[in-house]
Image (cartoon, rainbow, N blue to C red):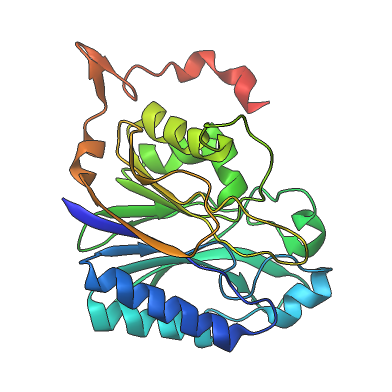
Amino acid sequence: MTKVAACQVAPVLGDPAATRDLVAEAVRAAAAEGAQIVVLPELVSSGYAFVDDAEALAAAEPVDGPTLRLWQRLASEHRLVVVGGFCEDDGGERAFNSAAILDHRGVLAVYRKAHLWDRERLVFAAGSSAPPVVETEVGRVSTVICYDLEFPEWVRLPALAGAQLVAAPVNWPDSARPPGERPGEVIRVQADALVDRVCVVACDRVGTEREVAWVGGSVITDADGWVLAGGWATTAASVLVADVDLAAADDKGVGGLSDIHRDRRPDLYTGVLD
C-alpha cells in the first residue's frame, strides 16, 4: 500500500508567500501521517480567478521559481512525491496553467493543461503534450488538471502508458446538486478510475476568491473507482490521507476473460477522433 494525500488549502490570490506557507504546513501535516505522495490544488501557487492574461502572467513563475523550489525542498525533506498546480511563466506572452511532479531528485515532469475551461482560454495558453507518466520510488504517477478529467481519452492515455496513479490538481467551482448527492465532479473521477482501472486523486481547494466558491471535494479513489477518502463538498481546509493499492492498477481484468484495455477495438473508434 502507498499512502496518498490530498492537501485541500485556500490559496491567497495576490500573496504567493502566504500561500507557500499554507502549502508547506499542509505538506508537513501529510508527511506526519506517513504520506508518500502528496497532491496539491490547481494553480495553488497563485490563486485562480484572474481578471485577464496580464494579471496571470504577473503572478506566474518559472519552473525554477520559489514555489517549485519549496516543493522540491519539502519532497527532499520528507522523502515524498509532490504533485501540484502552478501558474507557469515560460517567457511567452501568456502563462500556462501547469502541474509539476517532483521528488527528492527535483522536477521530474511539467504538464500544461490542454483543455482550458470557460474563461481560462482568455487567460492562459493551452498545453499541447499528453500527460506524462513518471517512475517514482513508490509507483508510476501521471498528472492532468481539472477540466482534463472530463475527457475520457485524456485519462486513458496515461493509463495505457502504464500509470498507476493519476494525480489531478483541480479547482472545482461550486454549483447546485441534489441533496445528499456527491458532487458531479467526484462521480466523474470515480468513473475515470473505474473505466481504466487506474487510481485517481483529485485535490480541490476551498475559500472564496472574487466571489467564486469552490466544491472543496478532494477525493482519493482506488482502481475500482471506490472512494477511499473525501468525495463530499466541504468548506474547510483539510489533509486527506488514504492507503492506496497502486499495484492493483496493473491488473486491467474486469471479470473472467475480459481485460478493459486488451478488449479495446480502436479500429472501430475512428469517429471519436474526428
Judge left or right: residue 128 versus residue 143.
Answer: right
| Frontmost residue, 222 versus 124 | 222
Q: Residue furthest left?
A: 1
Q: Residue at x 30, y 39 (%)?
A: 222
In the picture, the quarter occupied by the C terminus is top right
* Camera sees residue 105: no
* Camera sees residue 178: yes
Judge left or right: residue 203 versus residue 18.
Answer: left
| Frontmost residue, 226 versus 2 | 226
Can you say whether 121 is above or below 187 in the image?
Answer: below
Count all numbered tags in the image, as a single digit: 0
Can you say whether 265 is above or below 135 in the image?
Answer: above
The image quadrant of residue 78 is bottom left
| Frontmost residue, 243 versus 272 | 243
Rendered location of residue 130, percent (x, y): 52, 49
Can you say whether 62 is above or below 236 in the image?
Answer: below
Q: Residue at x 68, y 38 (%)?
A: 176
Rendered location of residue 48, percent (x, y): 68, 65
Rendered location of residue 192, percent (x, y): 45, 34
Rendered location of residue 134, percent (x, y): 34, 58
Q: Residue at x 63, y 51 (%)?
A: 114
